[in-house]
Amino acid sequence: EAGVAQSPRYKIIEKRQSVAFWCNPISGHATLYWYQQILGQGPKLLIQFQNNGVVDDSQLPKDRFSAERLKGVDSTLKIQPAKLEDSAVYLCASSLVRTDKQFFGPGTRLTVL
Amino acid sequence: AQKITQTQPGMFVQEKEAVTLDCTYDTSDPSYGLFWYKQPSSGEMIFLIYQGSYDQQNATEGRYSLNFQKARKSANLVISASQLGDSAMYFCAMTARSGYSTLTFGKGTMLLVSP
């Protein structure tokens, strides 16, 4: 069974530029999560989808971050414009149901210069 | 609100020895789940073990066991017979079972296994 796929693995941009990350969850997983993990900290949830609907985006900086999950399968997370403090690893995870164990992708390491 | 506390920034253990990684939690929800994840240097979060708040027995998965003490609100991870490949960051996390409560992580513990 294929795991959670993410791309790109690494991205370096300058501040005020835009960037987008892609995630393809495990087949059949209805719930998809995006996390931000700053160096030295645990992951922090940015947004949670149930199928193609948002169920929690309370910690998403909506002035610069956006995410969508069209057709309830893969998802994109966008940052526009990026700030220095957005440098982090962005992890995508999926689960069968919202409280089931979550399976994580390899993450995208973003560096904002 | 949920909170996870991991008080050990780093732990050292010799190969083949057992090690305990501490985790305490706080929640007002009567029903919740506790998780441990391993994050090697490659960055991927690997699920290790799960304990439900109403489970009578402590969870075990191979060399991993979860020492669940509900009254003390602790969920320590025990790794038996440590291996060099166990060197990684370990995160304790929890989720409440009511509503759409999210997975809350602790700050993690770095485990180094020496030969």
Image: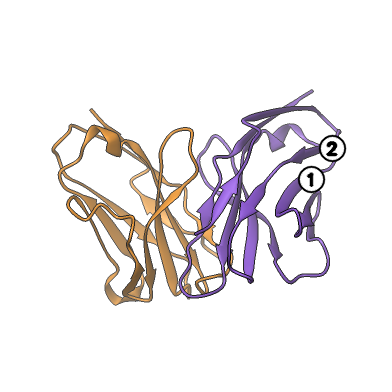
Chain colours: A orange, B purple
Q: Chain of mark 2?
A: B
Give the residue pinned by disc 2: B18
Q: Chain of mark 1?
A: B
B35 w.r.t. A73: above or below = above
Residue B104 — which label?
none
Q: Is B49 displayed left or right of A39 in the figure?
A: right
Do pointers 2 and 1 mark residues of a single chain?
Answer: yes
Q: Residues within 10 Å of mark 1 (few under 14, many from 20)?
A: some
Image quarter in which the N terminus of chain A is found: bottom right
Residue closest to the eye, A106 or B113: B113
Q: x%, y% of residue B14?
A: 81, 26
Q: CA distance from mark 2 to mark 1?
A: 7 Å
Tell me where residue A81 sits by quadrant: top left
Q: Secondary structure at mark 1?
A: strand
A89 w.r.t. B2: above or below = above
Q: Residue at x 55, y 52 (%)?
A: B3
Type of amino acid under label 1: Val
Q: Secondary structure at mark 2?
A: loop
Q: Pointer 2 and pointer 1: residues touching (CB < 8 Å)?
A: yes
Residue closest to the eye, A107 or B110: B110
Give the residue pinned by disc 1: B78
Image quarter in which the C terminus of chain A is found: top left
The tag earlier along the polypeptide, 2 or 1, is: 2
Q: Residue at x 47, y 71 (%)?
A: A27
Type of amino acid under label 2: Ala
Q: Is A65 displayed left or right of B31 in the figure?
A: left
Tell me where residue A66 sits by quadrant: bottom left
Q: Residue at x 70, y 37 (%)?
A: B86
Q: x%, y% of residue A14?
A: 18, 32
Q: x%, y% of residue B37?
A: 61, 49
